[in-house]
Every structure is written in structure tokens, then in C-alpha cells.
Image (tube, grey):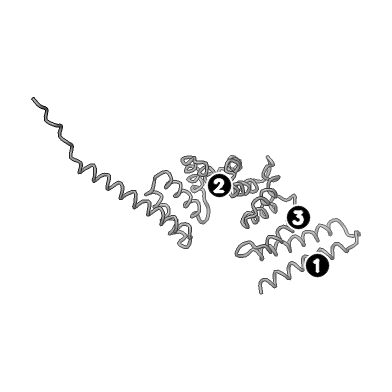
Amino acid sequence: MRHTHIKNIVLLSVSVLALSACGTTSGTDSASLDRTAKIDNVLERAAREASRGGHTEQSLGIMENRYKRNSNDPAIATEYARALREMDYLNRASIVLSPFARDPDGSLAAKNEFAAIQLALGNYVMAEDFAKQVIIADQQNAQAFQYLGIALDAQGMYEEAERAYRKGLDTWEGDPTSIMNNLALNLATQGYIDEAVEILEKAQSIAPDRVEVERNLRIVRTLQETTHWSQKKTKEKSINVVPKKKPAQDS
């Protein structure tokens, strides 16, 4: 039933486009702008409806149509690029958003999404650069701190990444499990196993259905048990060692 509704909205938008193309040029500019706005609203509603529960090829097509009609709008370009990234069309997403992200006066949302795209592409230095651009302009942008942390982690800069995650967590709004998960893995990599387990346990209590948190907690707990066992055996060995006596010297 929902697919039929979506199809009807798309057909309606096509019909409106066809009617506007057949109209005469005697209308006023304001009337033309009004018709354009109505068409854009129809496309926006259709994209929202089609993307409920996750983006699909159908919702992506609607968003592409909307982007093509408003190719100079950074907000629409950012939304379309995010959908492309989530559908794993990473190169297309990068191409769409690059002009807006590289604009020195461009929107922070575009720069932040561009950082996320570069992370997905494995361009960690570039992702670091754009995340830092966002942070310089907005010290409260928690998502930019998370992207910065991921980029630094990937480059082996673990202490710097930890600081980025912690700063992001300080100002995070909403469900914090993603950044808590990343911070915990960073700490585990540095050898702070007990703290990593503690953070993952807190994350699991917030979002018990997050599969990746449950999996990582199981892995880090195993690492914790192995580490504690190794430390115990090392301690026992050091206690049980009896110093050897020096051989008696012949007189």
C-alpha cells in the first residue's frame, strides 16, 4: 500500500512538470516561482516517504531529481550526498558535495558530511582536514569531533584520537553509543582494557539492541580475561622464584 502511495506521488510530480512545461509564458514570475516551490515540496515529501526505514534506489532517484532542480542549494546537495554515502555510492557522493565542501565560506554541514564521505573512501588525511575545519568554526560540533577521532585512529594517532572522542562526548546530543563504542575501542588499542569494558557496558545499557556494541564488548571482555590471567601468572611466577645460591668457592 505504501509503495502504491509513493508511486502516485512520483506520477503526480511528473504530471505537474508536464503541465508546467506546456503552459504559456504569460504568467508572472511569482506564479512561476510558486509552481516551482510546489513541485519541490512534492519531491521532498516523496523522498521522505520513500526513505522511511532507510534509503532505497527509489528514494535515491527522487532525491537526485530534487538535487538536479536545485543544484546550487548546499542543504539539498548535502542531503543527497548523505543518501549516496549511506547507499555506498561514495565516489558520486564526493563529486556532488565537493564544490560546497571546498568553498571557504561553505556550509559546515556540507564540510562535515564531506569528512564522513572521505572516511568511507579511506582518505583519512582529507577527512581529518575537513573535520578540523568544522571544529574551528564550531567547537560544539560533536559529530565533527567523532569524525576527527576516527580519522586520527586510522592513522595510528591514538592519544590524539582519544582526546577528540572525549571532546565530542562532552557535547554529544542524543544516543551516544556510537562515539562511546569508538572511544572504547581506542582505549582497548592503547591497552586500557578495563576502562574500555566499562564504557562498552555503559553503551550497552543505553542501547541494548546495538549489535556492534554487544560484539565489541564480548571481544574486549575476552581480551580483559586474557590480560588478567597473564598478569596473574606473571605475578605468581615472580613470587615462586627461589634465588639460586652461588656455588661454594673451593678454598
- The residue at which mark 2 appears reads as 147
Which badge, 2 or 1, is on the more N-terminal residue?
A: 1
Task: Confirm or deny contact between disc 2 and disc 1 (CB under 8 A).
Answer: no
Kindly identify the residue that appears in the image at 83 percent across and 65 percent down: 18
Residue furthest top in the image: 251
Measured as percent of width and height from the top left, residue 236 is found at 23, 46
Q: Considering the numbered disc 2 on the image, is that residue within a helix, a strand or a loop?
A: helix
Residue count near mark 1 (Cα–Cα under 10 Å), binned few <14, some 14–19, many ≥20: few
Q: Amino acid at mark 2?
A: Tyr
Q: CA distance from mark 3 to mark 2?
A: 28 Å
Above or below — where is 226 with respect to 31? above
- The residue at which mark 1 appears reads as 15
- The residue at which mark 3 appears reads as 68
Foreground of the two, 128 or 142: 128
Q: Considering the numbered disc 1 on the image, is that residue within a helix, a strand or a loop?
A: helix
Foreground of the two, 54 or 105: 54
